[in-house]
Structures are given as C-alpha cells and as structure tokens.
Image (cartoon, rainbow, N blue to C red):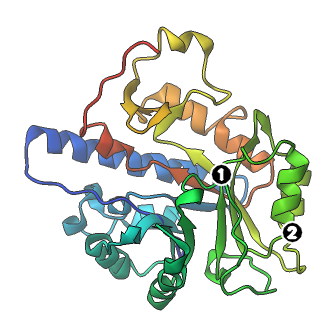
Amino acid sequence: MKTLTPVLSILTLFINCSNEQISEKSVGRKMQDFVCNISIYAHSYNANFIIIPQNGIEMAYNNAEPEEGINTSYLDAIDGFGVEELFFNGDYQPDQYRLEQLRQLKLYKKVSEYLSDNSMVAEALTLNYNEGFICFPRIESNYDYLLIPDIVPQENSNDITTLADAMNYLYLINTENYVLKSGFINAIAATNFDVIIIDLFFSDTALTADDINRLKIKANGGKRLVISYINIGAAENYRYYWEKDWELHHPEWIKKEYEGYSNEFWVEFWVEEWQKLIYGNDSSYIKKIIDAGFDGAYLDNVEGYYFLYHNDKSITPM
C-alpha cells in the first residue's frame, strides 16, 4: 500500500530471553497492533491520511525483533519513520545500529538531529541527504522544538502531495513563543517548508480546518503537508482528556513517570480505556485531528512498550 517513509528514532536493545523480555515482546506486538488499528481507523475517513511513528524502528519487524523479519502489516500501515539524533546528539555520534536498520528497511526517512552549535548544521544535512533522508537540524536553543529556523534546506516551490515529494520539514510542537494563535499561524504560513509537524492544539484550543487549510500552502504558493503530533505511548496531564481527579487517583493503566518530562506518564497503551481516548470514536484524539483537516498524524512514543520494562520509576499520587 505504501512505499515511502520519514524518520526520527530511539535505540532499543534486547539482551536475553528472560521472562521480562518475553513480556516485552508480547507488549511490542500490542503496540504494532495499536498503530495498525489507528491507521485503519484514519483511512476509513481519508484514504490518503499519513501515519508516521516517531522512534521505535523495531516496530517494523515481527515481535519488534529485527532478527525475526519484516512485519509487512505494520509497514503497510505507515508512511514514514521519524528518528531523532541519528548522526548527532550534541556532537557527532553516529548510531550505527539504527542507521543499518533504516538502510535495510528502504523506506522514506525523516531525521531530527540535535546539534551543539550551528557549525554542524551543514554536515548534518549532508549526511542525511546522502542517505536519502530529510533532516531537521536543531541546536540547543531549539531543543524543545519551539523555533522556526531561518533557512529552509533545499527550499523549493514544488507541490508536495506525498512524503516522497518532500525535501525538508519543520518540527514545531512547542507554541510558547507565541501569545496569539494568529501569530503562530502567520509565522508558519510565511515559510516554505515542505512538511509541517505541529500540535493539534494552540494552548488548550484545537486548531480549525481554516487554520490548517491556510498552512497547506507555502509562502511561495506551492502545496505542502501538515501533520499533527500525537502522543500514543504516554499520557500528558495538560491534555483535554486528563481528568482532574487523576491528580490523586489515576487509572491503573497510568504506570510510570516519564523521566525528564514531568507532565508525561507511560501508560499500558493496550488498555481499552486509553485506546478509546486515542482512536475509534468521534471524541477521540485521532478523530479531532482528522476533523481539523490535517494530512496525517505523527505518533510519538511508539517505543513505550520498551520503557514500561526498563529504567523503572513507579509513579506516586500526583
């Protein structure tokens, strides 16, 4: 069904055949099913809806194990991979493990590199373009994806209708630099990026179809794709679905604090209550994204199955 895919990834290693790994493998399959079902649901409304998982390249393989062969159902369900810090994590630190996986998968890749300073931007772009990946280089001041870079790599006026057409992208999921939604929309509309990844919400208000339609045209008149970020592996306590009493009595499926992100919590994503929040009904997150007119969804934390079993930090009442 699909031939191409963008990339942002996280390294996951499996060590032995302990009982923990057996459980992890089973949960990995549940995440594959989760992504596939999200895709099926979205495509029931829009046959061209784009699905891009961020990180967790292992999901492309049976049982999330590279040595067990390609999971064709999963690859048919997605259009791209998003991978963070493939060649750079501050300094030049190429991740050969993930790089080899991406080469073998022969899919369309999108990489976000974290650079300690601007002097590395040109090298990061070259390394990724040489692999056939498109790259979003960000320096320390843009660690949280809150700035629009001044330069658009390989800027063009082409109409971008599929991920395969894209030569660059903007990843802007933090809106704290903008007081008004209009300023946020105007700033993006004034750019020529081929693909835009933004949040569905500005503050607590969902963007409208009019907002998204405006963003689908580059400043130079070419068409582009607008993709919505959504976290499917961790709950965020600032989202519309978070209930006030969860601060003291959270559902059992909210399992662990997400280290480094005080407002996020790893979840048992296979639980029906969580999945209903994400897709499958008119009040679900994915349906809101579809109704707003986005071209696709960028699924964060698909590697959540792994972190449920590693770096354990059980949560306490919040």
Q: Is residue 2 above or below residue 303?
A: below
Tag 2 residue: 190
Residue 47 visible in this rendered orientation of the protein:
no
Q: Residue at x 48, y 58 (%)?
A: 54
Mark 1 and mark 2: span between their CA atoms?
Answer: 17 Å
Measuring from the top left, give residue 9's x and y in whole percent. 41, 62
Viewed as shown, does residue 184 lie left or right of 277?
A: right
Q: Nearer the viewer, residue 139 or 127?
A: 139
Q: Residue at x 89, y 59 (%)?
A: 186
Residue 225 visible in this rendered orientation of the protein:
yes
Q: Amino acid at mark 1?
A: Ile
Quadrant in which residue 265 is drawn: top left
Quadrant in which residue 145 is drawn: bottom right
Name the element at disc 2. loop
Viewed as shown, does residue 108 lie left or right of 189?
A: left
Q: Dividing the image into 4 quarters, which one contains the N terminus?
A: bottom right
Quadrant in which residue 39 is drawn: bottom right
Q: Earlier in the sequence, mark 1 or mark 2?
A: 1
Q: Is residue 159 above or below residue 30?
A: below
Q: Nearer the viewer, residue 248 or 2?
A: 248
Mark 1 neighbour density, 10 Å: few (under 14) some (14–19) many (20 or more): many
Name the element at disc 1. loop
Q: Residue at x 31, y 64 (%)?
A: 61
Q: Nearer the viewer, residue 115 or 134?
A: 115
Tag 1 residue: 173
